[in-house]
Image (cartoon, rainbow, N blue to C red):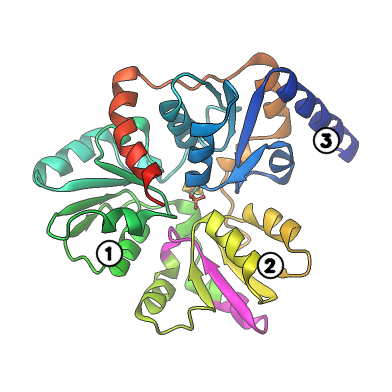
Amino acid sequence: MLVQQSSQLKEEIMRLKKEKDVVILAHNYQIPDVQDVADFTGDSLGLSRQAATVPQKTILFCGVNFMAETAAIISPEKKVLIPDLEAGCSLSDSITLDELKNWKMQHPEAIAVGYVNTTAEIKSELDYCCTSSNAVNVVNTIPKDKEILFLPDMFLGSYVAKMTGRKNIHIWAGECHVHAGITPEDVIKKLDSMNDTELVIHPECGCTTPFMYDVADGSYDEKKVSILSTEGMLKHVSKSKSKNFVVATETGILYKMRKDNPDKTFVAASEKAECQYMKMITLEKVYDALINEKHIVTVPKEIADKARLAINRMLAIS
Ligand code: 13P
Ligand code: SF4
């Protein structure tokens, strides 16, 4: 899109959201143009908190389906819109309702802890929901002798098991294709190409598990390697005195890192780490969603009522 066209569209979106009293929430992986028109950008936990508290009656969610569904569950009195219904998530697709019910049947005493990257149906079968920023703390609130089923991300699950020291966690073998595709070789190549570099890693990055284990064991200088949610990464790089960072997560986050820290250098661990679902949300679709009030995200009441219990537990733990 031409710069002039895009700035006209942005102006029109800003005018429309005011006129229609709509709040735009955008995930940190959204394209720069979409982040520019958002009222709030953030990680899954931060955006869920915004969805619960914003005064507007309509939320336009620029992210993927499970995020918009979570907003609709938290705020049933609000209208939640998503610009493209096809914006899915390979991680949330990695467990079905039947699979979860079967798994629970095999471990009838276990507590089910699920990542926010799950469908509303799956959430309705969970005891606790968590995000990458509070997964360790959520698991730490569960009595040590209780068996845990952790789903669906195996890398976040093994990180949580390592950090909490629990041996009684069963972990579902799901993964996000974007984060799992970032290899240790990618990371090492980038680290070797720069001096005095910090590494920030999202815990969904399976192939960086060796780094996570080294950090958890204390083998790395903690200041040099940090495992964080996307919002945690943004806060960390702004606070850090380091000037160079290798960033192991979806590349959309680099836009805000660079904007907030013009004097620092940020390099993607892998330029290929792009989520095609997140990138489905374009400025044109945001405009269309505002004009035509689409697409409305609904969750059946009986599913939403059950799922809300697990989500509220997630929101209560930082
Ligand atoms: P954050 O909650 O860290 O933003 O990550 C969620 C995610 O992976 C969305 O794709
Ligand atoms: Fe899902 Fe991975 Fe895309 Fe996040 S980056 S929305 S976990 S597919």
Tag in front: 1 or 3: 1
The quarter of the displayed image where residue 302 is located: top left
Note whether residue 268 is visible. Answer: no
Residue 266, label in figure: 2
Which callout, 1 or 3, points at the residue further toward the start of the chain? 3
Note whether residue 308 is visible. Answer: yes
Q: State the separation of the CA atoms marked 1 and 3.
A: 46 Å
Q: Position of residue 176 (x, y in %)?
A: 43, 51
Residue 222, label in figure: none
User: Which element carries disc 3, helix, strand or loop?
Assistant: helix
Q: Residue furthest right?
A: 4
The quarter of the displayed image where residue 137 is located: bottom left
Span of residues in magenta: 188-206
Residue contact at pointers 1 and 3, CB within 8 angstroms: no
Q: State the separation of the CA atoms marked 2 and 3.
A: 26 Å
Residue under numbered circle 1: 161
Label 1, residues with CA under 10 Å away: few <14, some 14-19, many ≥20: some
Residue at x 63% of width, y 40% of height: 40
Q: Is residue 9 magenta?
A: no
Residue under numbered circle 3: 6
